[in-house]
Amino acid sequence: MKPFTFSRPADIKSAQQLYKKNEASQFIAGGTNLLDLMKKEITMPANLVDINSLSLKEITTGDAGIFIGSLALNSVVAAHPDIIKNYPLVAKALLAGASAQIRNMATIGGNILQRTRCPYFYDVALPCNKRKPGAGCGALEGFNRTSAIFGASENCVAVHPSDLCIALAALDAKVFVQTDGKESIIPFKDFHRLPGNTPDKDNNLIKGSLVTKIYIPKNNFNIHSHYLKIRDRSSYAFALVSVAAGLHIERGVIRSAVIAAGGVAHKPWRLYETEKFLTGKTASAEIFKKAAVIAIKDARPLEYNKFKTTMLEKGLQLALKNAMA
Amino acid sequence: MGLFDNLYSPPPDDRVDGKQKVTGSAKYTAEFQIENLAYGVMVGSTIAKGSIALINVKEAKNAPGVLEVITHENTVIVENLKDEKKAKNLRLGLRIFHTNEIFSNGQPIALVLADHLEQAQYAASLVKVTYTKAAHNTDFDTTVNKEKTKKFTEDNIRGDVNAWKDAPVKIEAEYTIPVEVHSPMEMHATIAIWESNDKLTVYDKNHSVKDIQQTIASAFDLEKGNVSVRAEFVGGGFGSGLRVWPHTIAAIIAAKKINRPVKVTLTRPQMFTMVGYRPQSWQKISIGAAVDGKITGVVHEAISNTSVYENFTEGITGMSRILYDFKNLDTKYKTIALNKGTPIWMRAPGEATGAFALESAMDELAYKLKIDPLQLRLKNYAEKAIDANLPWSSNFLKECYESASKKFGWEKRKQEPMSTRNGDWWVGYGMGVGTWSAWREGATARGKLDNKGNLLLQSATSDMGPGTATAMVAIANTVLGIPREKIKFELGNSAFPDAPGQGGSVTTASVGAAVNDVCEEIKKKLFDFAVETAIDFKMAKYEDVIFKDENILVKNNPAILISYTQLMLNKNVFEIDLTKSSASGEESKKYSFNSFAVHFAEVHVHAYTGVVRVKRFVSSVDAGKIVSEKTATSQIKGAVVWGIGMALMEDQHVDNRYGRLIANDFAGYHIPVNGDVPEIEVLFINKPDPYINPMGSKGLGEVGLIGSAAAIVNAIFNATGKRIRQLPVTPDKLI
Amino acid sequence: MIKSEEQEILPGSSRRDFLKKSIALSAIAVIPAAIETSAKTRSDEKFAYQFEQLPLRLEINGKMHNLKVDPRLTLLDLLREELHLTGTKKGCDHGQCGACTVHVNGNRINSCLTFAVMQSGNKITTIEGLANGEELHPMQKAFIKHDGFQCGYCTPGQIMSAVACVNEGHTQNDEQIQEFMSGNLCRCGAYNGIVNAIKEVAK
């Protein structure tokens, strides 16, 4: 690992000033992804700003929604009574990710900023445009079993790895960001981005900005929601495909639906058209089946990930079915 | 009746080293504190074939804390590595630092040495290499497709090779297993310390201290006695610790070069390229049977990969020659050389691979015949070892079938696939069988009984996890009648008496016999003391006494007794110190020795997601007399967990364009986690083999894995009607 | 790493000057000036290295340690390589196996995924600190009784994780125990014994 300077400021202003002291600065919170990347020399900060002393751990509940501080731990959020009661999709997604130990270290802010697990990104001896723009995409014509089926470009077929983000995308969360003392709010659908010609950028966060909190609006999906994660072993593995589904049901009729898929794209993949199709319909296996067909219609799988299309089609039906249970 | 039947009940068998392991005080290789220790980090190649044109270590050398960077350009010359022929004869494998040739991706090419680990790690990233690339081949599938129709190196025919073709019912199928990697939790490490110019101490992760000692002594032209190899606690190995690997040689060279003790610990990704793996394999099985299920002919073909610098072979088709009554059989085998590191024996080498194909094929045949797979196996039971034309030393396979099927409830199985559904899950039952040649190697043990009644046993065997010392203490306790807490068994030190490496399930059968024999010698000595010094025993005959609770007793009048310590006091000796070698005799030529295991699995397959959960697993094992039931049970359970891994997830990918492994870490190479493993029920027939050794114990480390993956895959077929012949069965293959 | 018994390790005068001139930092903020300059200008790192050791004060198994460490040092490497507390194991160094599990302020974490300097002021408990002298922790006893290990290498991590699993209350049924213990790999496959040990202690 490359040597770096280290500091632990007490407030956001200091943190951002310290960050600016070096071109190659990096904030560190839980560190569960960053240490990994630093050990592999994928990320090589020369200046590390530890933000764990910042007062960003708070979870505030309100009538309109919930604010989750970016430094709140994954395990704390997953166990928060209001999250469990009103935003169960978030708790379920969090508990489907990583391990108990990692959830005790990883923060919410870090979770949404975690980088892809594409094996080509993770091996500096292999080409990867995300790691090294212009180097080429190793996965495109290589081992692309875990790659994207939606929204990929010829420059990058990596997928976003977070479970939490799939739930946050479904629930139309908002990301609160501080840049030079100014606060801005980014809707979750606009937070992460597709690779296009600049796969090195995972999201639309301006360099040096700090995610301060996540806001999730109160919703009607707490009764009927499900997070489905399909993976190669029972736990402690990234999703092949995941589905976050929330249904607002009144007398058997779907008043509204939110659905996002994970493991399929460079960002959490909202299935707006599917949601629209479901709205106003009576929930049934037949309707779910039709909805699933709509969900996969834009899928563009690669050589080794064709199964993901079917997996999403069937997984979506299962997630909807389980949400109804 | 075996030795263990006529004595008191077996002792409780908590591990004798359990306390050290649960408190963290057990010291594994990388954990020894050595003064003035330097840290070494290996650098691997990033091409699969070619040569190093230029290696620039300047930046690395200038990094803080760096002591030296060793490459082929500045190594201490080791004559036996410099000379290709000598290196080959001594089986040194890769000639690390003595060639600029690259044979595989990730091949170790440099060692960076620094005062601190983090310094060495950073500097390792600064080593810049320019290669002259050559066209590599890592593509197993394409190469097999070219090779499978050509001549095989081994072609062993028994009876009529074409018999299967004329049978009324036939199946013909190909099976593949990807590269699997041992992945012990402790990463391989070596600490090399030159005590003087010609004297070396090596703390090394291995489970074969004597072989490692011999190889290192030969490689560096040292007296064997001047090389001390230590490996007391070994954090798993499963075969990866059976030879000297390049990083060990590198550490020894480095310690010489910088004149300081050097510790080299591999990284987890390096564990995938530098210390072997189970070779990738292709198999084809052709079976013909009569309508009643009697098999009339079998052809079993297998190809596995090796490296381009060593030929590693394993007995993949071996089980087909032993397990069933195949009168007409042809087994064919060969290797193909690829630009990968050399494979190494990995738990149940050969047989685990072969059993997946054979036991899948048996299952396929049973469905085609519409016969219960268990009945098909009974129908083809081998009454003797056909190849060797010898009777079994013992064979309780039929008892295994019966006990396991009963415990499992096999009679509830439905022959028709997709017959049982539980909610969203398809339910299926499957079975698989395994056998493993049980043999006994020569071994020596030292026994030292002191005048306080403490028994110290020593042998240069190993314990990579099965509980060697626990078993040995159990044997000594049983034979000598000394309580467990007064017996200590030391291992993992090349200075101790000879013992085989821990591989092939031989440890208890071989070292246990030596422990038994040295304890018997001690008994004789004590008896002599009794005759000489104790009036009550003056006229006693050896067969009239028993040894129990640290006393010699007269069998017919147990009130007459004398303690071991009293006898030593009488005789005025401080200790009895004996060393005894033990080996098999003529009986080894008269019988065929085999352990057997029968596995039954219940799996649930999710109808929507293709996810498989193993819900129940029962294994019944004939491994002769069980010396230590608790640790033996754990060993079988562990092997079944390996079966789950093999069947459902283990798969080391390679990108053939770069000839480089993909996702070579625990996030990419999945081994089972806690949630993947159901409660596994283990049954032991527990009947002594009358010939193998005094305990009647046959090996059991491997046999639990053999056939267990097939049981799962067969159960998946029963659940879903999908026959998967390409391991592992990940959800994408079932969706 | 430099070990020290001093209660306070204050940065040298040059650093103090730097801090004075610098923006308002909290008391624990530390920027070694030399390396900062060096990092900017990419000057000789050997020079920088002498300055890059940072003070660190933390409690391990009830004992306070005042240290100076390379910021690159992970908590795991601090324990194993510098303090010789080798009970905590390195199985992957990337948070993929759980062998390095320790408790920080009572919560289980992977010590390979955190820098030692980030643990300033925290209370660390490792496997060496679990037993009460010679008296084993109930979980340690249960692991021996149920043979929850073979080679023993993942065992300290399993036990630290198991103790936390019980404290967290994630022991409602086998399935929950298994899920919450799935962050600890065991290649020997001792999972049955591990679950049974936890069930016994959770009772």
Image (cartoon, rainbow, N blue to C red):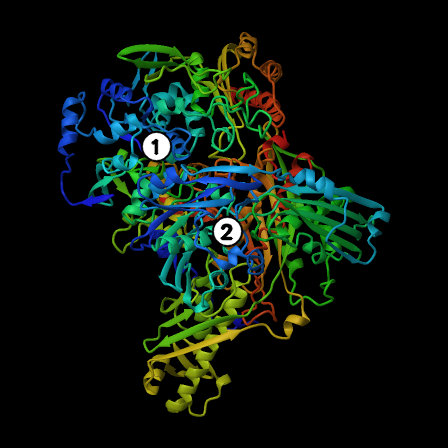
**What residue is shown with label 2?**
B98
Q: Are there few (<14), some (14-19), or many (20+) residues within 10 Å of tag 2?
A: many
Specify the label residue B22 is tagged with: none
Dot 2 lies on which element?
loop
Q: Is residue B162 left or right of residue A167?
A: right
Which quadrant, please, contains the N terminus of chain B? bottom right
Of the 4 image quadrants, the one containing the C terminus of chain B is: top right
Distance of label 2 from label 1 (alpha carbons): 47 Å
Q: Residue shown at 38%/21% (left/top)?
A: A85
> Which mark lies nearer to you, 2 or 1?
2
Count of numbered labels shown in the rendering:
2
Residue A48 in view of the camera: no
- Pointer 2 indicates a residue of which chain? B
Q: Which residue is mark 1?
A: A104
**Quarter residue A28 falls in:** top left
User: Is B151 on the left or on the right of C46, as rendered?
Assistant: right
Q: Are marks 2 and 1 in contact (CB under 8 Å)?
A: no
Q: Element at badge 1?
A: loop
Please give the chain letter of the residue carrying mark 1: A
Amino acid of disc 1? Asn
Residue B127 location (% of width, % of height): 42, 39
The residue closer to the viewer here, B461 or A213, is B461
Nearer the observer, A55 or B434: A55
